[in-house]
Image: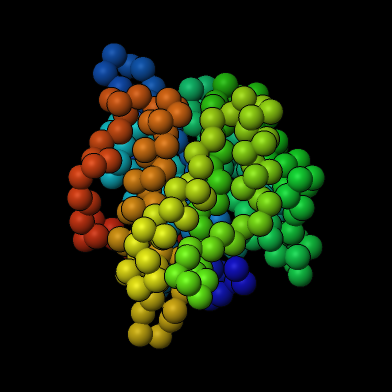
Amino acid sequence: MSLSRRQVASAVAAVPLAFAAAGTAQAGGRRARTLHIAGDSTAAQKYADAAPETGWGMALPFFLRKDLPVANHAVNGRSSKSFVDEGRLDAILGVIRPGDLLLVQFAHNDEKREDPTRHTEPWTTYRDHLRLYVDGARARGARPVLATPVERRRFDAAGGAVPSHGEYPAAMRALAAEEGVALLDVQALSLALWQRLGVEETKTYFNWTATEQDNTHFNPPGAIEVARLVARELLRTRVLAHRDVRRTDEDVPASWITWPQPGTV
């Protein structure tokens, strides 16, 4: 994904959007866990100048209990490498606390061979960088969670949904197995969802507008459905318990999505 005006606008936001104050106290004085997201534009907070583009991280809180806050550190255009090189992982590790979760989703920009500041190789440097997130979270008593990259909207001539991430999902799956890290297989689940929806209906989930045909980023309905996949995977892998999630089988109105002005969060 090349950097656009919207990506630059999002990148200037130094403080991640937390849908509830991270570290708020629960009844009895016990600090609430926070779910931190490290990722790229498919998950990131979007602002009013980018609407209706929506990151799935914006919708995830709708599927989690109110006292499980989400701190969305995902930033447009970043790879597992550039996120680290820019000090963004260090910023998360500076605030993450024992018992917190660090959900990591990268690959879209790791695939950019033409850009050495972002590119990684699936079975070597991609895995090396992902280990930095895993080891960093564990060193601070937090739990790392790896999520394979959500799929783009691509179909072949026969109408079959086509995977677009090459070896990156397989490399992440292997790393998760080696390191004993929970894996949310968002790539496989989103590919199956796009196949089920088909060529035309998937357009209503991606950022297709009168002026743009975007097959990578989501609109509110698409972000909501991907966030639903993430929440269900958090439950399936027992990262979260049934008491931690909600609405996984309920309708979530697109009107719940809002886009703040840049610099207001």
- 250 and 66: which is toward the camera: 250
Image coordinates for residue 146, horizontal then vertical, percent: 56, 38
In the figure, residue 194 lies in which quadrant? bottom left
- Can residue 17 be seen by looking at this rendering? no
Residue 26 is drawn in which quadrant?
A: top left
Residue lying farthest top? 28
Number of numbered discs overlaid on the protein picture: 0
Where is residue 9? Give x, y as percent.
51, 68
Q: Is residue 165 visible?
A: yes
Q: Quadrant of residue 244?
A: top left
Residue occupying image coordinates x 62% and y 25%: 180
Q: Is residue 244 positioned above or below 89 on the image?
A: above
In the rendered image, residue 6, in percent from the top left (x then y), is placed at 49, 72
Q: Residue at x 55, y 26 (%)?
A: 142
- Quadrant (top left/top right/bottom left/bottom right) for the N terminus: bottom right
Q: How is the image coloured?
A: rainbow
Query: In the current view of this chain or complex, which residue is farthest to the bottom?
Result: 211
Q: Nearer the viewer, residue 244 or 204?
A: 204
Q: Going by the image, does 119 lie left or right of 74? A: right
79 relative to 58 in the view: left or right: right
In this view, 212 is above or below 229: below
Which residue is located at x 50 percent, y 54 percent? 150
Residue in the picture at 35% in, 32% down: 68
Q: Residue 179, position in %: x, y?
A: 67, 27
Q: Left of 5 or right of it: where is 234?
A: left
- Is 170 placed above or below 246 here? below
